[in-house]
Each structure stands twice: as C-alpha cells, then as structure tokens.
Amino acid sequence: MTATSETGTTFAPPTAPAVRMRDAALSYGSRTLWSGLDLDVAPGEFLAVLGPNGSGKTSLLKVLLGLQPLSAGTVEVAGGPARRGSDRIGYIPQQRALEATVTVRGSDLVGFGLDGHRWGLGFRNRRERRRRVAAALEAVEATAYARMPLGLLSGGEQQRLRVAQALVSDPSVLLCDEPLLSLDIAHQRKVSRLIANQARQTGAAVLFVTHEINPVLPLVDRVLYLVDGRFRIGTPDEVMNSATLSELYRTDIEVARVGGRLVVAGAEDQDHHVHEADDE
Ligand SMILES: Nc1ncnc2c1ncn2[C@@H]1O[C@H](COP(=O)(O)OP(=O)(O)OP(=O)(O)O)[C@@H](O)[C@H]1O
C-alpha cells in the first residue's frame, strides 16, 4: 500500500520483516554453528543462503520452523515466535527419494499443504480446496502424474510435488532447502521462477538454501553466506566478490562474472559450495 504525503511525495509505510533474528546463535554442544546473527527478511524478498557442508544452513531453517531452539538471541517468523506446524510457513525440505512402496498420491501430498497442519478438520470448502490443489499442480507441471503413487515417481517429479505443496497455502515465509536438486535445467528454471513470482505476487519472503547460486542469481535480492561460524549478508555483488569470499574462507578466492554467471576459483579444496562451472 502506498500513500501520498502533503508534499506530494509517494511513500510506502514501513513493513514489518517476515523474518527477524537478533543476536541469534546456534550451538550443538561445544560447537557454535553461527552467532551474532542479525537478519531481517522483508516480505517479497528473495534471500539465498549459501555456505559449505555443515555450515548450518539447514539448521537455520529448522530454527525458523520452530524445530530447533536458538542457543542465544531471538527469532520471529511472520510476526510471531517460530513455532511448529505454522500455516504461514511453506517448506520445501531437502530431497530424500521416497521408497517405491509409498502409495500416497501427488494430489494428496499437495492437499496436505493446505490442511495438513490441522489434522482431521479439513479445508472448509472442498471445491476451493480442489481448485487450489489443481492450480498448484498445474504450476509445477505435475498434473499428468498427480494421481500416481509417489513411490513410483522419479526424484524430480517428487520434488516438483514438494514445491507445489509448499506454495499451495500462499505462505508468508517460504523456506526452501536445496529445492533444485534432481531437477533438470528446464525445471530448475521453472521452479526458481515460480518461487520468485510467489515472492513478488504474494509478498512471501523466500529463504533459499542452495549450493549453486547461478541458477537463481538473477532472482536473488540478498545473500547470506555462512562459513565456519563467520557470515556475510548483502547483495550478490557485495558478498560474491573476491575480497569478501577470501575473508570468509580465509584463503585466496577469485570471483569473476562471465556472461552473467559467477565463476569462483581457489575454493576447490575448501569443501565449498560454489562451483567453477556447472552444467547449465
Ligand atoms: N541435532 C543436532 N545435534 C548435533 N549436531 C547437529 C544436529 N543437527 C545438525 N548438526 C550438525 O551441525 C552441522 C550443521 O548442519 P546443517 O545440516 O545445518 O548444515 P548445512 O549447512 O545445511 O550442510 P549441508 O550443505 O551439508 O546440507 C553439521 O555438522 C551437523 O552434523
């Protein structure tokens, strides 16, 4: 919503952040994954979360899902404390291939995204429920196999259904844990655009954990980069540059932009999550 002041200038009223963390820390035993984290994610913002294996990216999402308490500091999600089962949060978990024996159908899985958090109550209007599930299936191009048992679908087909499940309830906060894994390039593009459009159109704040920023680089507003308890937050240009990554990794890293893509050299031995080249 915008308003016009007496001087004729148009301004937007300040909006409360969809995610707000203050001086947040997470430790498992004596190991601190990150500390002193101040993070605001605005409605409609697309934040990429990057970092090497074990840097605490998934753990950050677990904190926001109310599954993992902070060791210090505060967290608010969609205007309240982080809590399990919130219907304001859409979550695309890190992919695990399902057993061939799983007989739940794709359309049921997507339907759980609407009413799975209120077991037994069901969505109040069945026709509206069907319409929304059908629209979500259509958006990820999964209509053709929506009635098949999940266990018989390919990893990529299952993943598209998880995306539809996360989007179907129009969440205020969308938490995505490596959602592009096992998708072919065409579906990587479609799914990332779908998620970015959700952010722009419904004002959902997106936290997108990824080990490869290039497929989403044009969509990303800011990056949170975690390495060994250190972190940087900023625009892709502010974070994804030689000086900042060298400081974070404590070794010489070179970052170049080539044809709109980021090419990173020097971090090959660092168990890092940025690749010199990918297969796009
Ligand atoms: N409940 C737990 N208790 C103890 N240690 C844990 C727990 N959960 C995660 N860890 C450890 O915390 C570290 C961070 O894990 P996390 O899954 O958040 O990393 P990540 O950045 O998402 O890594 P990846 O890129 O490999 O998915 C790992 O070393 C993991 O073993």
Image: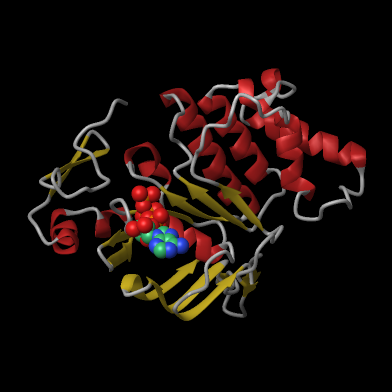
Q: Where is the N terminus found, in terms of image quarters?
A: bottom right
Instruction: State whether residue 155 appears in this view.
Output: yes
Say how many tags the image has.
0
**Looking at the image, is 268 positioned above or below residue 175?**
above
Instruction: Give x and y (percent) for residue 210.
Output: 39, 46
Rendering quadrant holding ligand 1: bottom left
Residue at 34% from the left image edge and 44% from the top image edge: 211
Tell me, what colour scheme is on the image?
secondary structure
Query: Which of 56/249 is in front?
Result: 56
User: Quick one: which residue is furthest to the left in this view?
Assistant: 252
Instruction: Give x and y (percent) for residue 214.
Output: 32, 39
**Looking at the image, is 88 positioned above or below residue 183?**
below
User: Quick one: which residue is furthest to the top in this view?
Assistant: 144
Instruction: Give x and y (percent) for residue 26.
Output: 41, 72
**Looking at the image, is 266 positioned above or below residue 76?**
above
**Left or right, 179 with reference to 272:** right
Instruction: Give x and y (percent) for residue 13.
Output: 60, 73
**Left or right, 95 with reference to 172:** left
Residue at 13% from the left image edge and 58% from the top image edge: 246
Q: Quadrant of residue 30?
A: bottom left
Instruction: State whether residue 56 appears in this view.
Output: no
Q: Where is the C terminus found, in terms of image quarters?
A: top left
Residue at 37% from the left image edge and 36% from the top image edge: 215
Q: Quadrant of residue 110?
A: top right
